[in-house]
Amino acid sequence: MRLLFLAALGAVLFLTPALGQAKTGDDEVIDSILGQNAISWANATWLVGRASGIFDEATSPTAAADKAAKAGWGPPGIPPDAPVDLKSFSLIVVKALAIPTGLMYGLFPGPRYALRELIYRKIVPATLGPDEAVKGEDAMRYLQAAQDWKEAHT
C-alpha cells in the first residue's frame, strides 16, 4: 500500500510542472510568429487584430486573414501563408489602430502612404525598405510602438 502511495505521489510531483506549462492557443500562435523570418498574412492580421481588440480570443489566424481582407486591410484573395512586406504591414496597422493620416494617404489610401505615415510618426525606422519582409519579432515591435504612439496621442 505504501509503495502505491509513493508511486502516486511521485507521478503527481513529476507531472505538476508539465501541467503548469500548458500553452494556450494565443501562446502557440505568438511563438510561431516570433519564429517567422517573414510574418505571414494570417499571423500579421491576427496579431494586429487581437492587439487592437477587433478580433476576439476565438479568432484563428486563418479566420483573421479572411476578416481582414473583407475589412480592406489588404488585397482580396491573398493567401493566408503569403509573406507580408513592410508597406503591407503598415497598412494593416494604420487601418486597425485608426492611426491619423495626412493628405497623401487621404488621396491615395494604400500601403505606400501608410508606411510613410508610420515613418513620420517614428513608429517604423526610416532606414527600412518598403518591400522588405517583416520578421515576426519586428512586427511585434512595430505594433507595440504604434500602440504606444496611439496611447500618447489620444
Image (spheres, rainbow, N blue to C red):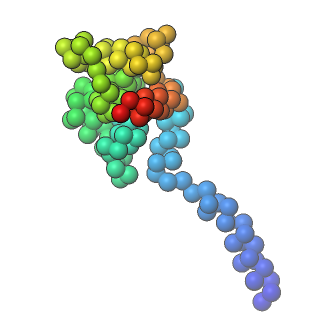
Task: State the image coordinates of residue 76 (x, y, percent, origin top left).
Answer: 22, 29
Answer with the quarter of the image where residue 8 lies: bottom right
Does residue 154 appear to the left or right of 145 in the view shown? Answer: left
**Outermost right residue:** 2
Q: Which of 100 and 13 is in front in this view?
A: 100
Task: State the image coordinates of residue 114 (x, y, percent, origin top left).
Answer: 32, 19
Q: Nearer the viewer, residue 100 or 114?
A: 100
Does residue 121 appear to the left or right of 64 in the view shown? Answer: right
Up/down of 85 relative to 32, above or below: above
**Outermost left residue:** 107
Quadrant for the C terminus, please: top left
Answer with the quarter of the image where residue 152 lies: top left
Residue at the (38%, 52%) spot, across then down: 57
Residue 116 in view in this figure: yes
Task: State the image coordinates of residue 84 (x, y, percent, origin top left).
Answer: 39, 24
Up/down of 139 relative to 14, above or below: above
Residue at the (35%, 44%) spot, across then down: 53
Residue at the (27%, 27%) spot, across then down: 74
Number of residue marks: 0
